[in-house]
């Protein structure tokens, strides 16, 4: 399979993991005049205009001047210098309108410390292509690790408040000595196929008329292929045979890693089972292509291009139809 092209993959940073315990090296990186930072507030990046384009990277000194960060993490280094991530307190930003009901958060936000800066939801930035792929990947890294710090401030063993260590890639308990690391939640996502048909479903929170690949979290002691078969059976009641890995994708909502698969159906009857799906149905290759092109007769459409679900679907659509290949072979015989 080709390298992933979907949103949030393609991080250009050298993560400098070998320097995370080196206090002197970390001090030099922070003192580098080329050091920059991405800054988050309420899980959203703070952006500035750079000419006519948006940029998520601020000079480190300016980033620190936006307020007292609750967490600072070394993300790594690119060809211009070190890159850090800062998390501001929730009250550093103010929503200018109530939250809507759509899949994207389109609210306007105000940062009183610097009203000229912009705050946008990361999913919206990706869907609307407001930032390039490398920048989105860096923001995905930052969002996930900062979310960990915002939600895991206490030791799971003894309950004492932990302290940030290893340049933001660990939390240590000063009481019992336990070490806690940022979590990444594995998710299996699969395009189920049967000949010239694919199985797509829609969850209740999806945008109206959008259908996508089935997906679910991998459980403890479970192989990825086993998770594929279990999730499809639980959600749709369809039996799965061969499972083939396709690609992976970081998904920072809040901190998942999506493992994409092609799954071969052994049965056709759909039996909605665990109440996760509002609907699930088989679509022909022609219907699926119409959904990707947003020309489906009933208005159904596919997930956005940033998602691995869209990549799995487009990979399948790009393959030659077996009957067409057979017809060409017969003509050439």
Image (cartoon, helix red, strand yellow):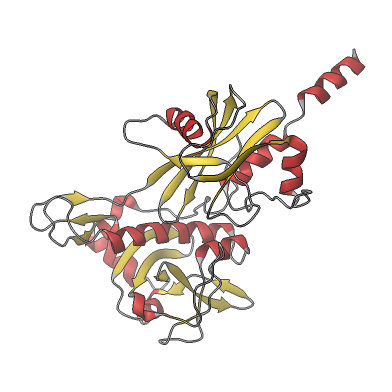
Left or right: 85 in relation to 119: left
Q: Residue at 32% of width from left, 31% of height from top?
A: 221
Q: Residue at 53% of width from left, 52% of height from top?
A: 204
Asked whether 84 or 45 is in front, the reply is 45
Percent position of residue 22, x then y = 24, 57
Does residue 68 appear in this view? Answer: yes
Q: Residue at 11% of width from left, 53% of height from top?
A: 158
Q: Residue at 35% of width from left, 79% of height from top?
A: 91
Q: Is residue 72 above or below residue 12?
A: below
- Quadrant where the C terminus is found in the figure: top right
- Quadrant where the N terminus is found in the figure: top right
Asked whether 141 or 82 is in front, the reply is 141
Count numbered badges in the picture: 0
**Residue 88, located in which quarter of the rendered image?**
bottom left
Left or right: 110 in relation to 210: left
* Residue lying furthest left: 175
Left or right: 81 in relation to 108: left
* Residue lying furthest top: 333
Q: Is residue 106 above or below residue 203?
A: below
Percent position of residue 27, x then y = 27, 67
Q: Is residue 331 above or below residue 118?
A: above
Percent position of residue 89, x then y = 32, 75
Percent position of residue 274, x then y = 45, 40
Does residue 21 appear in this view? Answer: no
């Amino acid at each position: 399979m080709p390298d992933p092209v979907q949103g949030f993959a393609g991080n250009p940073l050298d993560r400098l993991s070998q320097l995370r315990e080196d206090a002197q090296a970390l001090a030099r990186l922070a003192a580098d005049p080329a050091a920059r930072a991405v800054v988050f507030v309420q899980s959203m990046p703070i952006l500035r205009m750079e000419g006519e384009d948006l940029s998520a990277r601020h000079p480190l000194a300016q980033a620190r001047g936006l307020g007292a960060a609750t967490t600072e993490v070394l993300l790594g280094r690119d060809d211009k210098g070190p890159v850090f991530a800062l998390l501001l307190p929730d009250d550093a930003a103010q929503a200018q309108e109530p939250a809507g009901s759509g899949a994207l958060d389109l609210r306007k936000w105000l940062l009183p410390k610097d009203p000229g800066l912009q705050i946008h939801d990361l999913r919206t930035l990706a869907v609307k292509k407001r930032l390039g792929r490398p920048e989105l990947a860096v923001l995905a890294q930052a969002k996930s690790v900062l979310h960990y710090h915002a939600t895991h401030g206490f030791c799971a063993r003894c309950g004492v408040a932990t302290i940030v260590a290893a340049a933001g890639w660990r939390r240590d308990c000063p009481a019992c000595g336990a070490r806690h690391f940022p979590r990444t939640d594995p998710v299996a996502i699969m395009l189920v196929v049967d000949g010239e048909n694919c199985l797509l479903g829609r969850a209740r929170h999806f945008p109206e008329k959008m259908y996508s690949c089935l997906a679910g979290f991998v459980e403890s002691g479970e192989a990825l292929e086993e998770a594929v078969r279990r999730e499809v059976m639980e959600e749709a009641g369809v039996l799965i045979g061969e499972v083939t890995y396709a690609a992976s994708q970081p998904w920072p909502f809040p901190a998942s890693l999506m493992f994409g698969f092609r799954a071969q159906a052994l049965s056709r009857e759909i039996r909605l089972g665990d109440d996760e799906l509002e609907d699930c149905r088989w679509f022909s290759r022609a219907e699926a292509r119409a959904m990707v092109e947003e020309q489906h007769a009933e208005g159904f459409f596919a997930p956005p291009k940033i998602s691995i679900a869209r990549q799995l679907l487009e990979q399948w659509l790009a393959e030659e139809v077996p009957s067409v290949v057979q017809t060409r072979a017969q003509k050439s015989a």
